[in-house]
Image: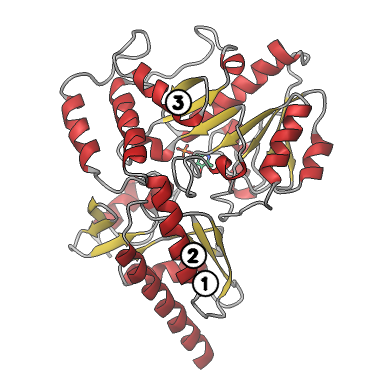
Amino acid sequence: MSERIDLEARYCAQNYHPLPVVLTRAEGASVWDENGKKYLDMMSAYSAVSHGHGHDRLVELVREQVGRLNIVSRAFYTDKLGPFLEKACTLTGQDMALPMNTGAEAVETAIKAARKWAYTVKGVASDNAEIIACRGNFHGRTTTVVAMSDEPQYKEGFGPFPPGFRLVDYGDIGALEAAITGNTAAFLVEPIQGEGGIVVPPAGYLKAAAELCRERNVLFIADEIQTGLGRTGRMLACEHEDVHPDGLILGKALGGGILPVSMFLARREVMNVFRPGDHGSTFGGNPLAAAVGLEALTILVDDELPQRSATMGDYLMDQLRAIDSPLISEIRGRGLFIGVEIDPALCSARQVCEMLMQRGLLSKETHETVVRLAPPLIISQDEIDWAVTQIREVLAEIDETRLAS
Ligand SMILES: *Cc1c(COP(=O)(O)O)cnc(C)c1O
């Protein structure tokens, strides 16, 4: 085994189970390991690298900005934050934004905004606000955010958890309706559940949920940290159902594959609950991150990455559906956000990912049974063809070994 793997395993907390490959370089949709072997990245850092690795314009911009102004904190105004947030609001149809760094922080921000809105605008009695989330959700890893999770491993050993969350089945509009009370501040939902296994809800669900929330004076907050910014073939996944959320959470691709950049966006009435000192972040909205975020958004539009995701995603989906393998129990997704469900009785998704890695295709299993295919949105058709060939051959190989034994 590589010395670098040993070293990382010795000093790094064992909170991940990485595939045994040591990456040293990347460009576009490709990454290289320490031995110079090239891989196609079909993971793109859980969609943080939608622009591709080391996008020219972003690298150029970072070089220029790093030499000028990087971190000053929000104790001062900068020339970068306003233009960045203006662009984010314009592209998403929101009024105001609160910049943070990681996705979990932006989710925390949304929770605080929803609760304070419930107390100061809706009139919920203090400390009684409730937020409804969905079973199978993933919104991040802080103690408050995992309080919303129904994944035992995310919670075991980390309690006690804060109250104020309620779970309903994802895709079940009746369950949402039944769960709403006078104390409900918000419904927090992923338009497609990413870490939950690329789970697409029934058609019309988001639209019905948003309408229900409006009728009952509940905020509809979309966590588009993974589905947003072109991943599903539209700028926002909510657009597939013409849904305009009251609150929107972005992260991952917002940093252009260069830096952690996240934000919570909302209607003015919601964002106005924050007063100076209510909430903050030393690094949130720093000029380097703001410059990168603005350029990342501009590139999405200039290079028509959402459209590209739609076209290439349809193509990849068709090619995958043409694979005839008993190991595949379902293929689902939207745009370049696709999950291939492997029948766990026949083999594990981890085994598929390890065999793909040996052939130079990097992916990662989610929830033990799903192979995630979410490449940079700049992936070419040739690269997709090559990937599909590897997948077809690996599945055939596993099937032959299985039948032979
Ligand atoms: C990744 C993710 C998060 C958490 O983002 P971090 O940057 O890892 O904190 C939250 N919500 C969704 C839907 C995600 O996919």
Task: Tell me which numbered mark, 1 or 3, is placed earlier along the sequence.
Answer: 3
* Residue 149 percent coordinates (x, y): 64, 42
Task: Tell me which numbered mark, 2 or 3, is placed earlier along the sequence.
Answer: 3
Residue at x 61% of width, y 76% of height: 345
Label 2 belongs to which residue? 317
Whether the residue carrying mark 2 lies under 8 Å from ligand 1 is answered with no
Apparent side of residue 337 relative to residue 63 in the rendered image (left or right): right
Q: What element carries label 1?
A: helix
Residue at x 52% of width, y 86% of height: 402
Residue 405 in view (yes/no): no
Q: Which of 108 and 242 is in front in this view?
A: 242
Dot 2 and dot 1 residues touching (CB under 8 Å): yes
Label 1 belongs to which residue? 321
The kind of residue on which mark 3 rests is Thr
Query: Label 2: how many residues lie within 10 Å, few (<14), some (14-19) or many (20+)?
Result: many
Q: Which mark is residue 90?
A: 3
Q: Nearer the viewer, residue 20 or 226?
A: 226
Whether the residue carrying mark 3 lies under 8 Å from ligand 1 is answered with no
Apparent side of residue 350 relative to residue 38 in the rendered image (left or right): right
